[in-house]
Image (cartoon, helix red, strand yellow):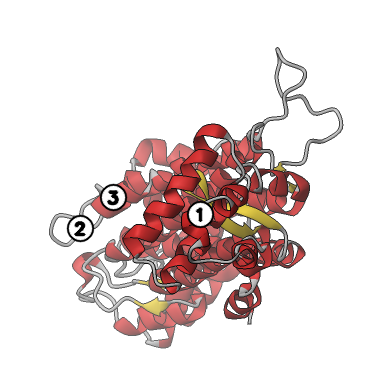
Amino acid sequence: MITRYSRPEMVKIWSQESKFKIWYEIEAHACDAMASLGIIPKKNADAIWKAKNVTFDVKKIDAIEAVTKHDVIAFLTHLSEIVGAENARFVHQGMTSSDVLDTCFNIQLVKSSDLLMDGLDKLLNTLKKRAYEHKDTLKIGRSHGIHAEPTTMGLTFARFYAEMKRNKTRLTNAKNEISTGAISGAVGTFANIDPYVEEYVCQKLGLDIEDISTQIIPRDRHASYFSTLGVIASSIENIATEIRHMQRTEVLEAEEFFAKGQKGSSAMPHKRNPVLSENLTGLARLVRMSVIPALENVITWHERDISHSSVERNIGPDTTITLDFAINRLSMVVENLIIYPEQMLKNLNQFKGLVMSQRVLLALTQSGVSREESYKIVQKNAMKVWESNKDFMTELLNDKEVLNYLTEDQIRDKFDMNYHTKHVDTIFKRIFT
């Protein structure tokens, strides 16, 4: 992933240095387990830990791999140079490359999940703060992009909070599902390695043991994991799209913070564009791009093939790094989002009370008019607002047919904005309590 869309904390998890460190820990813990079983001498297992504080030479390992064409063998060759050939001959006893690769991959995904979880917590706190800040800030609600009925900006933030809270639950479940390791040897039968070794290594590394691993950890786990990341990305785009809409010039109910010295356009000095939200929309596409390959990785030939390998070497780091960056960027956007309550009220009243049409419709039905006839009466007056810029309440007050069923006071009462916010506290209690 390019540095422009990455944070160093997540990049470090996927660095070659970190990967080789995890490989080493898997091999060293396996040696300890085998020593306790009497399979290898304890002194040789202890000697493997000489490399505990060593930074593995990535360039040297790459040079060995250029000859061997095998990354795990290249690593083991380099390890033998550090701990000595006599000790190294006991490393990787009965193990296969997938034991190291798959267990390491899952550890990296678990570590990535922890960072993503931290980011979601930060985003949730920000959304909650903005929700309470604008709990009673009136704005127009829209369906199909068209004015519908009044709502509040607080409810907008609250629904995004609820969505991200669900995503945190999904990510927790996905992390749990991916938190498995496998040290089961060729085709996963434990023929050349005792199951205790797997149990010991997984316990030391904080993983559950894989129930049955063939020679690889089943990829339905990973498919579920990356699908979850795709859902989170879509939620990010959902929020970003709302911000982009609100910042449109003819709407301008909110906008991204525009820093001193910032430029919006190389040609037009007046421009203030929602560039961060647009960027988040693009990043969400990149994250979702990993979902289909992850689903296709579920299918493997028999007990082992490497059709999934090249995919995961890309989507593992790229997807988690991108999503981590996107979550943290969105937190910053929401935190600094500028809200314009007066513009929200202006937009709300743009069609002169038209958004209260349902209240009038219901009042007529409750006064004895059929629903069909009530709809016809209200729509007749509503269309005057659409087509001739009339005032909706004025038209109703001048409509003799309406006055046959509703008094003037009853009609005026139907234009009380507070009617639409009377259950905001109830919704907030559901979400935040």
Label ID, residue 304: 2
Is residue 16 among the parts visible in the rendering? no
* Element assignment for label 2: loop
Q: CA distance from mark 3 to mark 1?
A: 73 Å
**Along the viewing direction, whichever of 433 and 33 lies nearer the viewer:** 433
Residue extending farthest to the bottom is: 37
Identify residue type, mark 2. Answer: Arg
Residue extending farthest to the left is: 302
Location of residue 231 by image quarter: bottom left
Q: Earlier in the sequence, mark 3 or mark 1?
A: 3
* Element assignment for label 3: loop
Residue at figure coordinates x 63%, y 60% from the top left: 415
Identify residue type, mark 1. Answer: Lys
Q: Position of residue 265 (x, y in %)?
A: 70, 20
Residue at figure coordinates x 76%, y 21% from the top left: 270
Report the mark closest to the observer, 3 or 1: 1
Quadrant of image for the C terminus: bottom right
Placement of 38 over or under 286, stated as above or below: below
Residues at badges 2 and 3 in contact (C-beta under 8 Å)? Answer: no
Label ID, residue 308: 3
Q: Position of residue 156 (x, y in %)?
A: 60, 59
Residues at badges 2 and 1 in contact (C-beta under 8 Å)? Answer: no
Q: CA distance from mark 2 to mark 1?
A: 80 Å
Label ID, residue 400: 1
Q: Label 1 neighbourhood size at 10 Å, few (<14), some (14-19), many (20+)? A: few
* Element assignment for label 1: helix
Q: Earlier in the sequence, mark 2 or mark 1?
A: 2
Residue at figure coordinates x 63%, y 34% from the top left: 248
Q: Label 3 neighbourhood size at 10 Å, few (<14), some (14-19), many (20+)? A: some
Residues at badges 3 and 1 in contact (C-beta under 8 Å)? Answer: no
